[in-house]
Amino acid sequence: MKWNTWAALLSVAAVSAGALAGCSDAKESASQDGPPSQPPINAAGFPVVNAPITIKMMGAKGPLHAEWNDMLVFKEYEKMTNIKVEFEAVPQNGYVEKRNVKIAGGDLPDAFYRAQFTPADEVNYGSQGILIPLNDLIDNYAPNLKAIFEKYPDVKQSITAPDGNIYTLPQLNDQLAPRLSRKIWINKKWLDQLGMSVPTTTEEFYNVLKAFRDNDLNNNGKKDELPWTGDNQFDILTNIRGSWGMGTTGSIGKSFVDKGPDGKVRFFATDPKYKELLEYLNKLYKEGLIDKDVFTQEVPQFSAKLTQGVAGSFSASNVNQAGSKYMDDFVPLPALKGPYGDQLVSTVVPMTQNQGTFAITNKNKYPEATMRWVDYFYGEEGVKFLRMGIEGVTYEKLPDGDIQYKENIRTNPQMSLDQAAGQFSPWPGGNIPQFVQMKYDKTGNTFPSSLESAKLLGPYIPKEIWPNFLFTKDEQDQLNSLNNDIITYVQEQQIKFVTGAVSLNNWDQYVSSIKKMGVDKLLDIYGAAYERYKKNGK
């Protein structure tokens, strides 16, 4: 399925621009008195500007994406808005380096799209004036975002820097299933063969994994069963740490910071329960219950194992990673109760699913028009357009009023659904400025199994889910040094403890090393950021 197939179909989709534009004849101007370089901005509807303008954007092109400048959604949106966007889409593997070189050299685009700015980048480039504050632009030119802020105050909290400014826009998601970033899926077909139930405790899980190891459940005469597997992003500790009461504020990257039972910010990677978790995982690894390749294998190798039917359980966002032949064999694993009765799902991110997806630079002559351009994708009409494309070309209506992708996207023999969608829209791979809503999400996120997992795990997510905090420039400079030492050390030791390369008899030495690296200072910084976050919500 190529772009030119859809390009040909565009000629029969005459209703697209008019239908998607909606109130295109709304011409009330919101800034008739702007500077000479700024054309009048229409307050509502389309076009955004009456006279055509061009805006240059740079971003990280996902591996599933066609060329952005050729995408159907962007080409059609240019007609609707009168804004031509010239994209410099850099393959994401080398994007951050190239972006940073351009910023250092002052060779800035007008905006960054799929920007991949970290919280540190936001504060750093914002404080330097490279990224402009968006607060007033949102107030005056982003009605969809303003409505979201009013309905969900925590979204605004999560993207506001310590200086009170908003420098980047997020990806938002109102569904729980995709925000459960990693789930464990277990082979129900194998359980039925063994006469075993879906495990509900960590001890039962251990016994099930042993049964998976010791029986030829795929009936191929080989001892090739993998009780528990994943790719190199598969954080086995994160997947199951909630069973030891850790990760009480959700998934905030690799910080190892949450709130302890006393309500205070803690570094749980030195907690005695963390040691017990490592002991449990070490037992699993030593007994061959965890795939030996789990810390090194890339997604293709992991996917190949799943499609060979050798997995007893695996960690991934959606069950469809097991492939069409085996995906129906798996069901979601519930929140396992740990040895102290803890039963928590810590692999959940807030509604602000990704921060730092879009920013406007100080080189932009049309910041108002740029904000109106991006705000569309935070409203229902724009979400539908971005996710589904054009009726009759990329999607169709069903008799019950629902919509679905056209067959050449849903069941393309050469491409997965995400690959096919990535030919006409940049949403596959996420990290773009959008508000993903269930009614227009026709991916694995809304498969019955994913919805079942959200229903099953939802009661066990933390009551308070932290975003990735934004720190002051001074705090971030200190964190860069602290994290480089502490987090790197914890991650390295985690793998060594689990694999047995380092004995857990060295635990006291490990804790002492982390204290010497300055973990108390790290906690002070997180504590200050948490207090600001709470204050922003008042």
Image: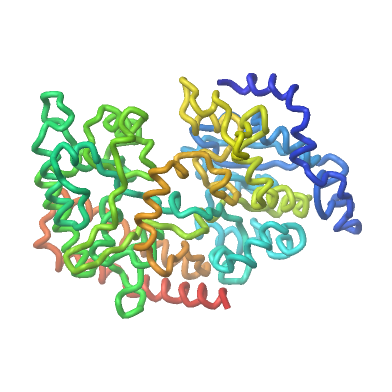
Image quadrant containing the C terminus: bottom right
Tell which of 512 and 370 is nearer to you: 370
Tell which of 114 and 121 is nearer to you: 114
Residue 428 in percent (x, y) is at 52, 38
Q: Is residue 239 visible?
A: yes
Image quadrant containing the N terminus: top right
Residue 385 in percent (x, y) is at 66, 40
Is 94 placed left or right of 245 in the picture?
right
Q: In this view, does 363 lie above or below 463?
A: above
Tell which of 386 and 432 is nearer to you: 386
Q: Residue at x 14, y 40 (%)?
A: 212
Q: Which residue lies furthest to the bottom in this view?
A: 262
Residue 235 in percent (x, y) is at 30, 50
Q: Residue at x 15, y 24 (%)?
A: 220
Residue 525 image-quadrant placement? bottom left
Q: Residue at x 10, y 56 (%)?
A: 503
Is 272 placed left or right of 76 in the picture?
left
Q: Is residue 265 above or below residue 54?
A: below
Q: Is residue 133 visible?
A: no
Residue 34 in percent (x, y) is at 87, 57
Is 328 placed left or right of 189 in the picture?
right
